[in-house]
Image (spheres, rainbow, N blue to C red):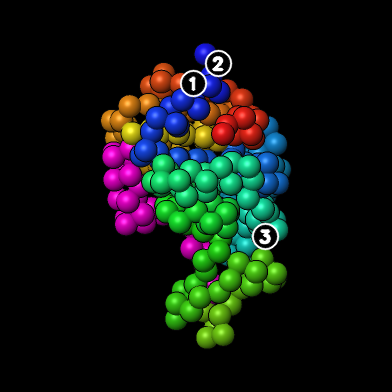
Amino acid sequence: MNKISELQKMIDESNNIVFFDGAGTSTDCGIKDFRSKDGIYNMKTKYNAEEMLSSNMFYYSPLDFYDFYRTYMNPLGAKPSTLHKYLKKLEDNGKLKAVITQNIDGLHKLSGIKTVYELHGSVYENYCLKCKKSYSAEHIFNSSGIPKCSCGGVIKPNVVLYGEMLNEDTMNNAIKSISNAELLIVAGSSLLVYPANQMLNLFKGKNFVIINNSETPYDYKANLVIHDNIKKVFEKLK
């Protein structure tokens, strides 16, 4: 049995599937990932990506933060891919119980998937630090300079920056989903980002699958590892 057929069999036989992903699942939608040779970490910028996307940069040099953020983190216009549509079908069929994503591009929700835990937040949620008024992603990405609220406060994207903690409720829901899953599929993630990667250690179900272009530190724990393009894999699934 080839690996795609093996994965299909696992999916067919599972009624509690949890999908966990990272930036590699959005590259087919035209969004850059972080760690590949063409990823954001390898862009020549004033500071490295972790510094540019840190809470320190946002609070102490917000203009530099927003220049970087608008240039490299803008997903407006990106459409859900074959992967997102497949996951939506699994949820509609009652098999997929949750998507847990490290991505902030909102593509899972745009595809219509209902149960999505966005560990690192979403670019589609923005709020004034002073009065908490909400602003759209379009407002942020189409503005210039430091975006300000009508009250004069600075607007912050509701994304988890380096140096910030994950949202406790989101993390607890993700942990519960992984702990109860029968099949856990991880795709498009280097599995290097803490603490998101640590959640995988709580899986105690039947099958653990990793789909990624390159090796991850968790490959040895998986029942099935597929090193291939994610789009190619999900195009072959029924």
Q: Please name the residue that numbered disc 2 is placed on.
A: 2
Q: Hey, what amino acid is under mark 2?
A: Asn
Element marked by disc 2: loop
Q: Could you say which disc has been placed on residue 76 in the image?
A: 3
Identify which residue, 17 or 68, lies in the foreground: 17
Give residue 213's quadrant in the image: top right
Nearest-to-viewer mark from 3 and 1: 1
Element marked by disc 3: loop
Q: Residue at x 49, y 72 (%)?
A: 127
Q: Quadrant of the C terminus?
A: top right
| Earlier residue among tags 2 and 3 | 2
Instruction: State the count of labels.
Output: 3
Q: Residue at x 37, y 26 (%)?
A: 207
How far apart marks 2 and 1 lie (CA) works out to 6 Å
Q: Residue at x 44, y 81 (%)?
A: 131
Give residue 38's quadrant in the image: top right
Identify which residue, 198 or 68, lies in the foreground: 198
From which residue to which does the magenta span run? 154-181
Q: Hey, what amino acid is under mark 1?
A: Glu
Q: Please name the residue that numbered disc 1 is placed on.
A: 6
Dots 2 and 1: beta carbons under 8 Å?
Answer: yes
